[in-house]
Image (tube, rainbow, N blue to C red):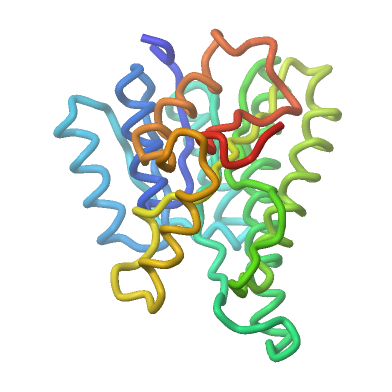
Amino acid sequence: MLLRNKNALVYGAGGIGRAVALGFAREGATVHLASRTPARLETVAADVRAAGGTVSTAVVDALDEAAVDAHADAVAGEAGSVDVSVNLVSVGDVQGTPLAEMSLRDFERPVHQAVRTTFLTSKAAARHMVRQKSGVILTFGGVGDPLHGYYIGGFQVALSAVDMLRKQLAAELGPHGVRVVGLKTGGIPETIPGGFEGREALVASLVEPTMLGRTATPDDVGNAAAFAASDRAASITASELNITCGAIVD
């Protein structure tokens, strides 16, 4: 198992959070799942346990600095280490409205949430990882070309900001033995709500540019996250794992 005896903090219990939690658990990590939605937390935790994994849960608002710090400190104190941290909290973006018609509030919401939650969760974990001289921080997203014919609001701007934050964290934490790796996807259809207007066309637009004729699945993301967090990826930092199925060419 790639992550045996590792403690992994997973912030966000949505679709990708569930996939990553399951991927970590399959590889032997103890998953410390945090979300501000208790019902969703317990659902994902039950799935992890049903798959034979070990999981703890905590209601945490990843926008709250004190709450995030307290959670990381509690895991380190009780479990003995913080080995992996990944922020998969929804950025709350507004899509489908042209930028020229969008309110400032709607535009800046994903930027604020993505940068703040990534910064706070990374900082909380990094304090323990620096002391340990080891650890992996993962980010999630994908930076590509603008979408033609679809209004994506501030979402891609948010991902670009997180991308730069990842690089800066890697530069500062590398000397302490801490790696920072991004997971770059071209979009995961399973995360798009079923009632979303234009969902079918949006999914088709995600599949069309791929070289494999499909997008990454949640399981693909979970497996890539487990690899990136493991010692098998010990030489990878400040980089992204491209799991876009060829939609984005590096």
Q: Position of residue 195 (x, y in %)?
A: 30, 75
* Side (left or right) of 63 relative to 165: left
The count of marks equals 0
Looking at the image, is 90 positioned above or below residue 228?
Answer: below
* Side (left or right) of 198 relative to 93: left
The residue under the point 44% across, 52% down is 12
**Which quadrant of the structure image shows residue 73?**
top right
Looking at the image, is 138 positioned above or below residue 42?
Answer: above
**Which quadrant of the structure image shows residue 219?**
top left
**Which quadrant of the structure image shows residue 38?**
bottom left
Please name whichever residue, 29 or 131, is drawn nearer the observer in this view of the structure. 29
Q: Position of residue 26 (x, y in %)?
A: 30, 22
The residue under the point 60% across, 62% down is 63
Q: Position of residue 162 (x, y in %)?
A: 72, 49
Please name whichever residue, 203 or 30, is drawn nearer the observer in this view of the structure. 203
Q: Which of the image's four quarters has the N terminus?
A: top left
Please name whichever residue, 127 or 246, is drawn nearer the observer in this view of the structure. 246
Q: Which of the image's four quarters has the C terminus?
A: top right
Q: Position of residue 187 (x, y in %)?
A: 50, 51
* Side (left or right) of 146 relative to 27: right
